[in-house]
Amino acid sequence: MMFEKISEKSYNKLIVTLYTFGGLLMRKVALITDNWKQFMISAWPYGIVDRMRRKGAEGTLYIFNSAGCWSLDESYNRAEYNIMRLADFTKFDAVIADFNNFSVQDEVDEIIDRIKKAGIPAVSLGKEIDGFYYAGVDNYAAMWQVIEHLNEHHGMKRFWGIFADPSNFESAERERAVKDYLDSHYLSYSENDFAHGDFAYQSGVVCYKKLRLTHEGFPDAFICANDNLAISVCEEAAKEGKKVPRDFAVTGFDNFDKASFYTPRITTVENAREDIAYLAMDMILALWRGEKIERKQYIKTELVSQESCGCHGDPFDMNQYLRKQILSGVDTDRYEEELMNMESEVMQCNDAKSVVAVARASLPSFRVEGLCVVIDDHVFDYHDDDGRGEMAAPELMEFNIKGYSSNMHVLYADGCFRGMEGEKAEEDIFKKYLLEKQGEDVLFMPLHFGKYTVGYYVTKSAIPMMLSQRFFEIMRIISRRLEELFRSEKLNYVNVRLENLYKRDTLTGLFNRRGIKIDGEALYRRAIENKDTVLITFTDLDRLKYINDKFGHDYGDLALKGVAESLKSALNSDAIIARTGGDEFVGIEKISGPVDFDSIRERIEDKMIDIGSHGNFAFPYSASTGFVLAKPDGSKSLDEFINDADEKMYIEKQKNHRKTDYLTEMQDDEDE
């Protein structure tokens, strides 16, 4: 029975069916995430993979991680987000996405559009997106609980707020809860009572100072979008002699370690990110089973009332905290030393492959199952180039700004990727990076030079390194050195090309007088040192003035180019050949055996006859050549030997003079 050809869409459905009923294929989940500043959000992949393993789910995780929210250069950030274009969502079984930290909205819109068109289950973390399921914190309800506690338990009525930019979904929901509570309880406030920045400590400092400049006195409480901001308020207030909670209360959100171990301990909201990842994966598993689920699902949150609002809170183990800090400090010191040594070694590498290999070998903490680096072939355009080729474009127009080039190969591969080195990168990443075991993960990170995309990194079992927050800095060191090497090679290439432009004759492409002075003298000095024999050739085009006057300078130029081609054909490939005057040419080359002047002269003449015939030259076309074979010992200069060859040429020209005059007269008679 013949099988009918089926569409790709039908084929994909068939594959899913085979998996569902036969357990033949491992389901693939894509995780889209952006760093917070320079810190990887490791809770997402950790929670997803942990859930897969605990639930026995036949699934694997592909992490597409960028760091596009910390640079002020939007083109740099866009190059970071280009890693998302590696993900063909039609080939995945589900997507989990965190768009909270993305700094370029149209990049987010494009990713969302591609996910929707793929028609697969999609869960958004911490930000509600139309058409996606939502897993996260009920930010509104949790923050309502905070202000309700301040108002009803402590009797506070006047509040100032410090939040992130309103474009951030989580912060906006928290701020909305505060304002709605104040409105519903008829508590007065103005928009000037709220300052906005981001979630970082320094942003809290700026917002605190802004509020102090625009207000007199203090509120009953500062309500902050997270714990970083809350601590910054306490620190700035202390500089003014104010003490929390004696003078006013401060609250945060997220319940990081710093909230409990700061003095005063910060009133906050328990918000375990791993729980969000667990919930997201549970929703995906339910959808794979064909169940109908709620579009929005929330993890459990809890108000943690501590000293900063006037409560006492639960006791904590300071000894345990100090032990943790000491061990963390030891680990950090060791890593910093390793990182410094690695960077020092990497900076001494002079080729791209060595950079990656040294980085991999010199950092013991780099404990991943495999590292693979895919790079655009154009990175090597200027490598070991002597500058004799055509001048490359001054801008990096060969590199892609959006999407990935088709000219990409695996530069480096080890561990589970061993054997892939040198292979061409496939558009379908699963042809190279297909995971086969439950709960496995692979991480993709971008490699770019500024706005230009030049490749990407792939690592397997990367979650431990993401948890330790070490990947980003390591990859930055590698990327920076690769870019330095590229730009250094490019600069060297451009310098060589510029030097060659000064040394080259624009008409023939041969060296000019400056070139013969620099490169010819260098060859001559080496000949003296090595006691080599040097052949010096002096060639003069016959009757150039006649050709120019009778047939025009265009033909004169063609004739000169023909002499250049003839000399390149007759002399050795490493000979230095120059046009030193209007119709004069000099050749210098090292000779290792006997020399037949007549044979060289014959090769020059034969090539000129061939050029004249193909060019339909309507004039006698010949040249006169003189030769000097020298074994320089330093007693004579190169110029003196060239003058000797010039004299030999003149003698040869005198022999040819009667012949060329006769041919010229015959040509003139024919023209008349």
Image (spheres, helix red, strand yellow):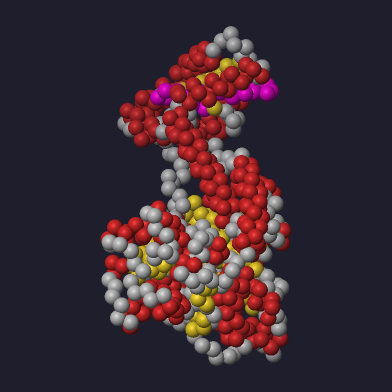
> Does any portion of residue 455 appear in the rendered image?
no
- Camera-side residue: 233 or 136? 233
In the rendering, at what x and y percent does residue 249 appear?
A: 41, 67
The residue at 54%/37% (across/down) is 386
**Which quarter of the picture shows residue 71?**
bottom left
The residue at 52%/61% (across/down) is 262
Q: In which quadrant will I find the N terminus?
A: bottom right
Left or right relative to 550: residue 353: right
> Does any portion of residue 297 appear in the rendered image?
yes
- Count how many numbered circles sit on residues in the image: 0
- Camera-side residue: 612 or 59? 59
Residue bounds of the magenta highlight? 577-597
In the rendering, at what x and y percent does residue 475 appear?
A: 58, 53
Q: In which quadrant will I find the C terminus?
A: top left
Residue 199 on the magenta span: no
Q: Residue furthest front?
A: 246
In the rendering, at what x and y percent does residue 218 appear?
A: 33, 64
In the rendering, at what x and y percent does residue 102 appear?
A: 45, 65
Say above or below: 365 vs 349: below
Say above or below: 190 vs 487: below
- Camera-side residue: 383 or 456? 456
Q: Residue furthest top?
A: 635
The residue at 56%/22% (across/down) is 522
Left or right relative to 400: residue 274: right
**Which quarter of the picture shows residue 73?**
bottom left
Left or right relative to 240: residue 403: right
Residue 585 on the magenta span: yes
